């Protein structure tokens, strides 16, 4: 399971660097330094063989090459890289003890740590750290990848509606001067009685901040799940639906926002619950 934790750490740390708005060269240098430091700690502190550290770095490099950290859902990568990482982590939870024996300065430190820390297996601590780092930004990438088909379908529906509306409107296109004249406000004369302007309906804006809300929500779900507060977790799910209800109800009959909300929320919650289950499994083994 240490290998799975190491994979979550190297992937999560690289994604945090990718969203830090550094230049490409600077981000590459920072990622390489971080990966080198993590590999050194894993080899000398946990007894991970160096070839396994190279394999983990290879998986992480494939992740970086096949995913995008941009917030635009339409430019998101496919869902397969995320599934691949989760499969590798799941396999490591089962086969971790069979690959190598943990030893090193971190193992020695854990043996002499205070009871509050020493009571928790070192593998669990490392896996929890990797899971928390992965849930911050890397999980956002997986959520956007899951949302891309729904967004593309919605865009296609919008385009089809626009084409149908244009075909149904058989009136010839006005000239630019006519359009300006039609869009200009009516002229008022001294004998005309001013009328109060009619207030246009204020649209309900899309809620922003999902890039920050998602990680906080996932970390909260992990903490509450491990604490056994499952009713509070259900309350968090319900509260999110209530907060999003005005935005969803304003979407009309199409329901694309409802689908967007359901897909994104379910994928995000599933990631949080899956990694919380991984932490629990590592504590029991």
Image: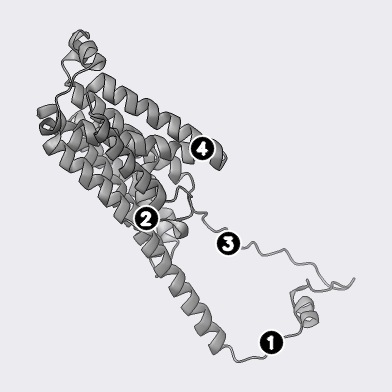
Task: Specify few, some or many for label 3: CA neighbours under 10 Å numbering under 14, 14-19, or 20 or more.
Answer: few
Q: Secondary structure at mark 3?
A: loop
For the residues labelled 2 and 1, the Cα–Cα distance comes to: 40 Å
- Cβ–Cβ under 8 Å for marks 4 and 2: no
Judge the density around disc 1: few (<14), some (14-19), many (≥20) Cα neighbours within 10 Å: few
For the residues marked 3 and 4, what is the alpha-carbon distance in whole angstroms? 45 Å
Q: Nearer the viewer, mark 4 or mark 2?
A: 4
- Residue 193 is left or right of residue 86, and the answer is right
Q: CA distance from mark 4 to mark 2?
A: 23 Å
Q: Which secondary structure, mark 4?
A: helix
Question: Who's the residue at 45% across and 61% down the image?
Answer: 250
Residue 239 image position (x, y, % from top left)? 33, 43
Residue 216: x and y in percent read: 37, 36
Q: Is residue 220 visible?
A: no
Q: Position of residue 155 (x, y in %)?
A: 46, 69
- Residue 162 horizontal/vertical position (percent): 52, 78
Lower sequence index among marks 1 and 3:
1
124 versus 18 height, above or below:
above
Q: Which mark is residue 27?
A: 4
Distance CA(mark 1)–CA(mark 3): 28 Å
Query: Mark 4 vs mark 2: which is more N-terminal?
Result: 4
Residue designated by label 3: 201
Labels 1 and 4 touching (C-beta < 8 A): no
Residue nearest the viewer, comparing 203 with 9:
9
Q: Nearer the viewer, mark 3 or mark 4?
A: 4
The residue identified by callout 1 is 173
């Amino acid at each position: 399971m240490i290998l799975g934790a190491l994979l979550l750490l190297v992937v999560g740390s690289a994604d945090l660097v990718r969203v830090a708005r550094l230049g490409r060269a600077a981000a590459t240098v920072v990622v390489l330094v971080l990966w080198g430091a993590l590999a050194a700690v894993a080899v000398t502190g946990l007894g991970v063989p160096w070839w396994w550290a190279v394999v983990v770095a290879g998986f992480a490099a494939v992740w970086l090459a096949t995913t995008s950290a941009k917030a635009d859902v339409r430019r998101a990568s496919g869902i397969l890289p995320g599934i691949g990482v989760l499969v590798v982590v799941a396999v490591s939870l089962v086969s971790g003890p069979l690959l190598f024996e943990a030893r090193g300065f971190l193992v020695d430190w854990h043996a002499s740590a205070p009871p509050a820390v020493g009571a928790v297996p070192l593998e669990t601590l490392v896996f929890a750290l990797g899971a928390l780092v992965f849930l911050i930004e890397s999980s956002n990438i997986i959520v956007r990848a899951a949302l891309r088909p729904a967004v593309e379908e919605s865009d296609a529906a919008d385009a089809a509606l626009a084409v149908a509306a244009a075909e149904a409107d058989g009136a010839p296109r006005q000239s630019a001067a006519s359009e300006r004249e039609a869009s200009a406000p009516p002229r008022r004369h001294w004998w005309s009685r001013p009328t109060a302007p009619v207030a246009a309906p204020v649209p309900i804006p899309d809620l922003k901040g999902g890039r920050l809300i998602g990680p906080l929500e996932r970390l909260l779900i992990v903490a509450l799940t491990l604490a056994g507060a499952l009713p509070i977790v259900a309350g968090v799910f319900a509260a999110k639906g209530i907060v999003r209800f005005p935005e969803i109800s304003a979407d009309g009959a199409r329901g694309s926002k409802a689908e967007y909300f359901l897909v994104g929320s379910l994928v995000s919650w599933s990631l949080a619950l899956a990694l919380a289950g991984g932490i629990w499994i590592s504590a029991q083994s």
